[in-house]
Amino acid sequence: MGVASAGTWQSVGVGDCPGRDVSGSRGPKPEAAKCDASFAGNTAVCWATGCTYKSVATAACTGGANPGQMYTCAAAVAPPPAAPPPAASGTWQLVGTGDCPGRDVAGSAGAKPDAGKCNASFAGNTAVCWATGCTYKSVATAACTGGANPGQMYTCVAAAAPAPASSGWQPMGVGDCPGRDVAGSRGPVPEPGKCDANFAGNTAVCWASGCTYKNVLTGQCIGGANPGQMYTCGAAAGPAQPPPPPRRPAPPKLKGRKYSIVNYTGDKQNPHEFIVDWKACKVAELSQEFERAPDVTVEVCRPGSRLIIKTDFKATGSFIHYDWVLLDDSATLAGAYCDQTTCGPSAGKRAK
């Protein structure tokens, strides 16, 4: 049986939600001991006199009548066990906190997933773990959302067969990076014809169903949400030319207020920048990570009180959904985000 380990409380702005109170403490900050693996992703709301602890994911903690300083529990989690050597086995990759209803096909005791349950037939599917045990779901991890009991979420990355020696593709372990996709192919290994002198040093990421090709140096391909078997193109057909510098998006013509936002996933912080035209209720994202800035759909715009938007990355089919309230005379955005794999706190300030 796994032992719950202590974690850290992370401040995520101001907020509150009704009910779901499970305990309380005195003082203006939450007690460290109340954040452990069994409470990961849940919420504390604190005022000058004390704190209350709520069994609700912080991203869903909205609508309360007494907003205070809100914290989320980011419990320390040991990395999943390394995969055993047989070719049919794989590795469990931690992707954050989440859950989805139904589709349970197995279970196990302990706070980490069973290495033997990740194999080629379960590649891309999901395990959700709590301090007392894990459940295994026959659903792609990117689609595992909306469950009522979030825990530590893992995806199964099955060991891929090596690429043909003559192809020039060299396996580089497991990984992913956002955007920069230029092509795709079917099957669990990259196509030899897509590795040539013009693509030398660049990257392919493969899953059981297919591969995507990215015009980014393999050593710089990090931070993606869907890890797979990663390959680098080691083409030997003449001296490799360095890839052209990534094309930066032209700054949007939109005029308005600039906000610097941080999305929190456990102990990771993912920064984003937005331009908001409150008069026209239009929003654009400023990003140097992507070849093209994402499309932004404004769903709710109430200047001075509420902003809900969705950013779509057409090249990869991914998205991020944001729900913020405005505080400090519109100088602060505080709320939550959700993408294909997880939800978490999202907050930031108006930039100078």
Image: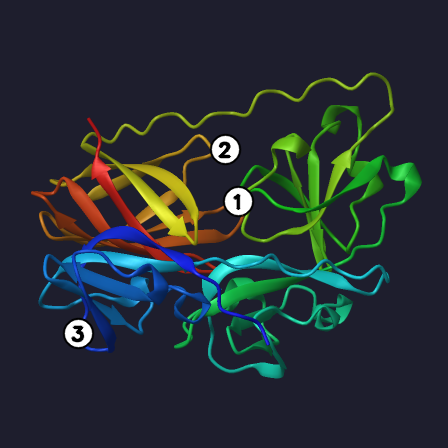
Tag 2 secondary structure: loop
Q: Name the front one of labels 2 and 3.
A: 3
Residue assigned mark 3: 18
Which residue lies at the image location 16% right of the left edge and 56% below the top edge? 28
Task: Give the total number of marks visible in the rendering.
Answer: 3
Q: Name the front one of labels 3 and 1.
A: 3
User: How dense is the environment of label 1, judged by Cα within 10 Å: few (below 14), some, or many (20 and up)?
Assistant: some
Question: Does residue 344 lie above or below 326 as drawn?
Answer: below
Residue 291's label in the rendered image is 2
Tag 3 secondary structure: loop
Is 285 on the left-hand or right-hand side of 213?
left
Residue 281 is at least partly visible in this image: no
Q: Are marks 3 and 1 in contact (CB under 8 Å)?
A: no
Mark 3 and mark 1: Cα distance apart in space: 39 Å
Residue assigned mark 1: 315
At which x and y percent is residue 120? Answer: 77, 66
Given the image, on which type of amino acid does mark 3 rest? Pro
Mark 2 and mark 3: Cα distance apart in space: 42 Å
Question: Does residue 149 lie above or below 124 as drawn?
Answer: below
Q: Are marks 1 and 2 in contact (CB under 8 Å)?
A: yes
User: How dense is the environment of label 2, judged by Cα within 10 Å: few (below 14), some, or many (20 and up)?
Assistant: some
Give the mark, 3 or 1, whose residue is nearer the N terminus: 3
At which x and y percent is residue 199? Answer: 73, 28
